[in-house]
C-alpha cells in the first residue's frame, strides 16, 4: 500500500517540520489539496507552497486540484514540482483535452470523482490515467467521516483494471484511518490518502507503518 499523507491536516505554520520525516516513516507520496473557494467552499494551497516544499522533500508530490479551472492552473503546479496532477471530472467539459494537455506538460495524470458521481462516467478515460482518485468524503475539508459508497467504486475500478490491464493506481481520499483503510485495501485500493489519521496521531510513524501493511 502506498500512503499519501494529506498536508491539509498539518500545522501550516510549521509545514517543513511537519513533512520532513514522513518519507523516512514510509510515506512515499505527499498529498496536496488545492482548493479555490469556488469548486469547493474552502481555499488552501497554491504553487508557491508546493515549490517551497519540493526543494526539501524527495516524496512524490500528488497534487489534488479541487478547482473550477484546472487547465488555467495546471502548468504552474507542474513548474512548482507536482509529479501527479489530479483534477475533477465535475470541473471540466473536456476531460480528454485536459488529459492530453497534462501529458504534454510531462506530468502523471489523475482523474477524481466526488462521492455522488457514478464511477461509470470514468470508463471512457480509464486507459489514459495514471491515477484514479475516489473521493470518500465531500471535497473541501479534512476530518470528515468515510462514506462507504466509495468501496463499490474501488471494486469496479479494480475489476476494470484487471480485465483490461489498465496501468492506473486506485487512490482513495477522505476519512481514511486503519479501519476504513482496511476496507479500502480489501476492495483493492492501492493508495491511501490520510490527513487527520496521520497528523493528529501521537505517533505518526506507527500509523503510517500500519496503513502501509494493509
Ligand atoms: C478533502 C481532501 C482530503 C482531506 C482528507 O477535500 O481532498 O485529502 O485532506 O483528510 P482526512 O484524512 O482528514 O479525511
Ligand atoms: Zn485530497
Image (cartoon, rainbow, N blue to C red):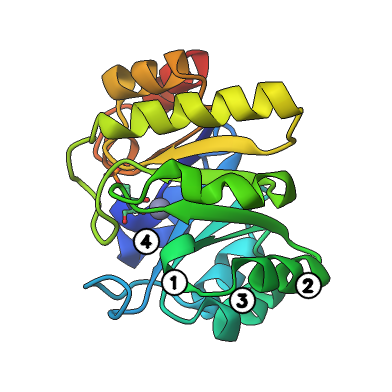
Q: Measuring 71% from the left and 69% from the top, which residue is drawn there?
A: 102
Spatial CA span between label 1 and label 3: 13 Å
Give the mark nearest the N terminus, 1 or 3: 3
In this view of the protein, which residue sits in the foreground, 175 or 49?
175
Q: CA distance from mark 3 to mark 4?
A: 26 Å
Numbered-mark total = 4
- How packed is label 3: few (under 14 Cα within 10 Å), some, or many (20 or more)? many
User: If you read the primary sequence from the N terminus, does the residue marked by circle 1 or circle 2 appear first?
Assistant: 1
Q: Nearer the viewer, residue 153 or 206?
A: 153
The residue carrying mark 1 is 91
What number is the disc on residue 74?
3
| Residue found at x 28% / y 79% | 37
Q: Earlier in the sequence, mark 3 or mark 4?
A: 4
Do we see residue 20 in this rendering?
Answer: no
Question: Disc 2 to disc 4, how far (Cα)?
Answer: 31 Å
Side of 79 where 17 appears, left or right? left
| For the residues bearing labels 4 and 1, Cβ distance under 8 angstroms | no
Q: Is residue 172 above or below residue 77?
A: above
Residue 142, image x, y percentages: 25, 51
Residue beneath disc 2: 105
Residue at x-position 37% and y-position 16%:
182
- Of the two numbered discs 2 and 4 in the rendering, the one whose residue sits closer to the viewer: 2
Query: Can residue 147 be seen?
Result: yes
Q: Quadrant of residue 145?
A: top left
Lower position in the chain sequence, tag 4 or tag 1: 4
Q: Which quadrant holds residue 140?
A: bottom left
Q: Secondary structure at mark 4?
A: helix
Determine which residue is flagged by label 4. 14
Question: How far apart are labels 1 and 2 at the CA level?
Answer: 19 Å
Does dot 2 land on a helix, a strand or a loop? loop
Mark 2 or mark 4, earlier in chain: 4
Amino acid at each position: 500500500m502506498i500512503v499519501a499523507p494529506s498536508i491539509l491536516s498539518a500545522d501550516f505554520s510549521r509545514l517543513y517540520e511537519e513533512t520532513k520525516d514522513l518519507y523516512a516513516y514510509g510515506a512515499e507520496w505527499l498529498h496536496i489539496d488545492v482548493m479555490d473557494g469556488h469548486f469547493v467552499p474552502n481555499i488552501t494551497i497554491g504553487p508557491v507552497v508546493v515549490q517551497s516544499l519540493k526543494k526539501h522533500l524527495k516524496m512524490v508530490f500528488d497534487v489534488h486540484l479541487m478547482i473550477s479551472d484546472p487547465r488555467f492552473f495546471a502548468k504552474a503546479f507542474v513548474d512548482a514540482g507536482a509529479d501527479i496532477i489530479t483534477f475533477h471530472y465535475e470541473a471540466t467539459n473536456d476531460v480528454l483535452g485536459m488529459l492530453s494537455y497534462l501529458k504534454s506538460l510531462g506530468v502523471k495524470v489523475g482523474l477524481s470523482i466526488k462521492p455522488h458521481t457514478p464511477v461509470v462516467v470514468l470508463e471512457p478515460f480509464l486507459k489514459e490515467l495514471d491515477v484514479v482518485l475516489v473521493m470518500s468524503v465531500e471535497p473541501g475539508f479534512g476530518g470528515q467521516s468515510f462514506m462507504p459508497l466509495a468501496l463499490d467504486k474501488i471494486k469496479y475500478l479494480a475489476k476494470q483494471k484487471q480485465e483490461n490491464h489498465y496501468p492506473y493506481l486506485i487512490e482513495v481520499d477522505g476519512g481514511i484511518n486503519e479501519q476504513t483503510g482496511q476496507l479500502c485495501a480489501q476492495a483493492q485500493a492501492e493508495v491511501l490518502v490520510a490527513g487527520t489519521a496521520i497528523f493528529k496521531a501521537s505517533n505518526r510513524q506507527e500509523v503510517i507503518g500500519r496503513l502501509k501493511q494493509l
